[in-house]
Amino acid sequence: MSFESLGLRAELLRAVSEQGYSEPTPIQLQAIPAILAGRDLLAGAQTGTGKTAGFTLPLLQRLAATQPAVADKKEKGWRPIRALILTPTRELAAQVRDSVATYGKFLPLRSTAVFGGVNIKPQFQNLRRGVDILVATPGRLEDHMEQRTVDLRAVEVLVLDEADRMLDMGFLPVMKRIMAVLPKHRQNLLFSATVSNEIRTLAQGLLRDPQVIQIDRISSPAQNVTQVVHPVDKDRRRELLAHLITTQDWRQVLVFTRMKFGAEKLATQLDRAGLQATAIHGNKNQNQRTRALADFKAGRVRVLVATDVASRGLDIEQLPHVVNYELPMDAESYVHRIGRTGRAGLLGAAVSLVSADEAGLLADIERLIGAEIPRENVPGFEPAIPLVTTGKQGGGRGSKSKSGHHQHTQHNTRGEKKPHWHRRSEQKRGGRTQRGNSR
Ligand code: AMP
């Protein structure tokens, strides 16, 4: 199935082809026709499935094909906001807006993003100039509503992206206040990595006869991601991480910690040890985050240390290595974390440094993914306190490296097929994260 056969117009096909996409991803195959037909949508899909293009392409097509419903207002040339896309984080807002600009580059539609953590004034100007598509985080959008710098009365399409994360972050009341000012008659598209009861409740109140799409259950990490656990004593984790980065010559590695403080400290220590490292977490302002991400993408920084929240929506293409410096408290975050690598069918490696006290967390993760992650001791770092998990998955106690060598390219924990879609050309688009300026 090709993008052409989905009925997308030439301007969009050209943009898609410039991106090097050869065929639609599964979510795109299902979502694009439904959205073009004007249906509401409930889509269970994680980041990495191509969901952003899945809603952006048909959205752009619909807007390009019609005139705004309310055109009777104000001065000549007034451009009402016709599509509103809500995202949980500023990073995701910037990236979605970037996708809108990329896919819509041959169409005369304008877009901007508004999110917190940056000066609000330039956003006033962008909004005043008029945009067709607004990408926003709920909090900052409400600020604009209160200041009457945004008019949402002509919104035809509402997209909730990563709705589960927005609920986790406590945005439901703000989202309700936003939805209350939108026209009742509109198309609603709800995207969520997990479809929990809370999401179902939200969907019930919001969606009219939705098409339901479920892509890639949360519990299945991509098959092209190699997973390994290196047992290690807690106080030697940093040393082991530095050892792995150096001896395996990792050039671009995303490291997860649980706490902001831990992220900062680890980045500083690695940096001092001569491995260019920086941290990205909630205490950093938008400029610092954007710079850290740009440095990392450009290869000026080798190690990016992140907390789970800060990492959401980071779109880093061709990220080869993800390290769990500490295991997350909830097993699903593990799947989210390792979903940062192995994007778009590329190979990735997810390495977890696990100390004895994390055995319970590891068991939870293995229960969720339904597989045991191979254990490999790294010579010289064998833990004094052994890592013991009560195997719930059947099978042996993991594959300790027989040769004593810690290569780990061979294991895939699940037997699913590799996604059949992939880029035609692996063109790297540097600096994908732009701020939300009007085009
Ligand atoms: P998303 O799930 O929207 O975050 O997209 C994940 C990645 O897949 C992004 O880097 C997109 O550029 C890429 N992508 C989206 N659609 C396709 C496609 N049809 N073929 C190849 N890559 C794609």
Image (tube, helix red, strand yellow):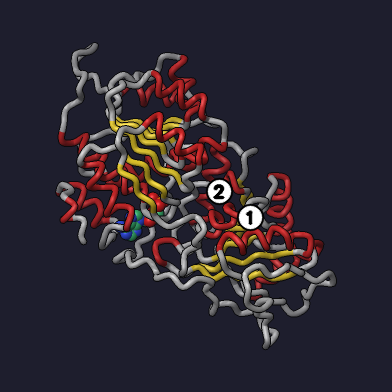
Taking depth in this image into account, of 334 and 267 the one nearest to the observer is 334
Q: How far apart are marks 2 and 1 (CA)?
A: 9 Å
151 above or below 318? above
Callout 2 touching callout 1 (CB < 8 Å): yes
Position of the C terminus by quadrant: top left
**What residue is at 35 percent from the left and 65 percent from the top?**
426
Is 141 situated left or right of 264 in this image?
left
Q: Residue lying farthest bottom?
A: 403
- Residue 389 x %, y %: 73, 67
Instruction: Name the mark on residue 256.
Output: 1
Q: Which amino acid does label 2 sit on?
A: Ser
Label placed on residue 300: none
**Res. 235 image quadrant:** bottom right
Badge 2 or badge 1: first in the primary sequence: 1
Residue 311: numbered disc: 2
| Quadrant of the image occupied by residue 65 | top left
Relative side of 131 to 328, left or right: left
- For the point 68% across and 44% down, which residue is it? 260
Query: Can see residue 429?
Result: no
